[in-house]
Image (spheres, grey):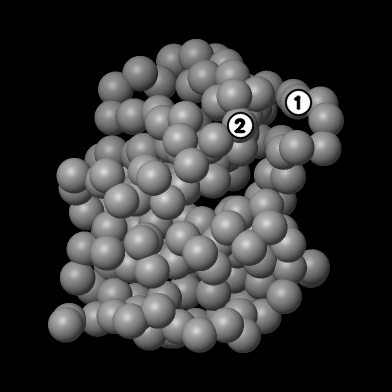
Amino acid sequence: MRIVSGKYGGRNLVPFSGEKIRPTPDMVRESLFNILRDKIYGASFLDLFCGTGAVGIEALSRGAEKVCFNDIDRDSIAVLKKNLEKLKVSESVKIFNKDAITLLESAKEEFDFIYADPPYKSGLGIKALPYAARALKKGGTLIYENETPFSDEVPKNLKIKDERKYGRVYITFFIREEE
């Protein structure tokens, strides 16, 4: 696993073992950030179920001003910290080890982008979406990764803008609308 492009492009991330972490494939990250392009530069980004941190690190690599990483799993946070140390990233990041809803309920800031890649079949992502909508800036983008097309009720203030399929992964883009 590697960072695809930007400041840290081509750098490998720390290998991990086990089945608890399911990183977003390089191809999906590359496509995602090709869609976001220059919008990511100077943005605030929350990697809500960060695992290894690959998506958030990719955002930093491509110019995000600030990235917050969150995962409830301590092993994931340990891998994330090793990746940040390996890349010598210490500024512009915050790390949280909380349940996603608890983090979003207590968020004191709003984000330009929130990336939600919950454990598939857990139901956590759907439960977190309304809270994530409140933590987004108006006009902000919520990016939701899942193994199936999005078919649940869309939370208030969010609108589906686009959905794409990459292999076995679906990426749904929501925009926070004005209230």
| Residue wearing tag 1 | 16
Residue at image point 50% right, 85% down: 153
Q: Secondary structure at mark 2?
A: loop
**Residue 92 appears in which quarter of the rendering?**
top left
Binning the other alpha carbons within 10 Å of mark 2 as few (below 14), some (14 to 19) or many (20 upward) gives: some
Q: Residue sitting at 68 percent across and 58 percent down?
A: 122
Location of residue 108 by image quarter? top left
The location of residue 50, given as percent across then percent down, is 54, 41
Rendered-image quadrant of the N terminus: top right
Kind of residue indicated by mark 2: Asp
Q: Is residue 126 left or right of residue 94?
A: right
Q: Whole-Å distance between the Cαs marked 2 and 1? A: 14 Å
Quadrant where the C terminus is found in the figure: bottom left
Q: Residue 5, relative to residue 77: is it above or below? A: below
Frontmost residue, 144 versus 27: 144
Query: Looking at the image, is 15 positioned above or below residue 39?
Result: above
Could you tell whether 45 is left or right of 138 in the image?
right
Question: Residue 157 placed where, x, y %?
Answer: 29, 80
Say if residue 99 shows up in the picture.
Answer: yes
Residue that mark 2 sits on: 73
* Residue at the image position 19 percent from the left and 70 percent from the top: 138
The one nearer the camera, 60 or 151, is: 151
**Secondary structure under badge 1?**
loop
Nearer to us of marks 2 and 1 is: 2
Position of residue 45 relative to residue 28, above or below, is above
| Residue plotted at (47% across, 30% down) | 97
Query: Can the viewer see residue 53?
Result: no
Q: Amino acid at mark 1?
A: Phe
Towards the viewer: 86 or 171: 171
Q: Position of residue 37 (x, y in %)?
A: 40, 61
Q: Earlier in the sequence, mark 2 or mark 1?
A: 1
- Which numbered dot is residue 138? none
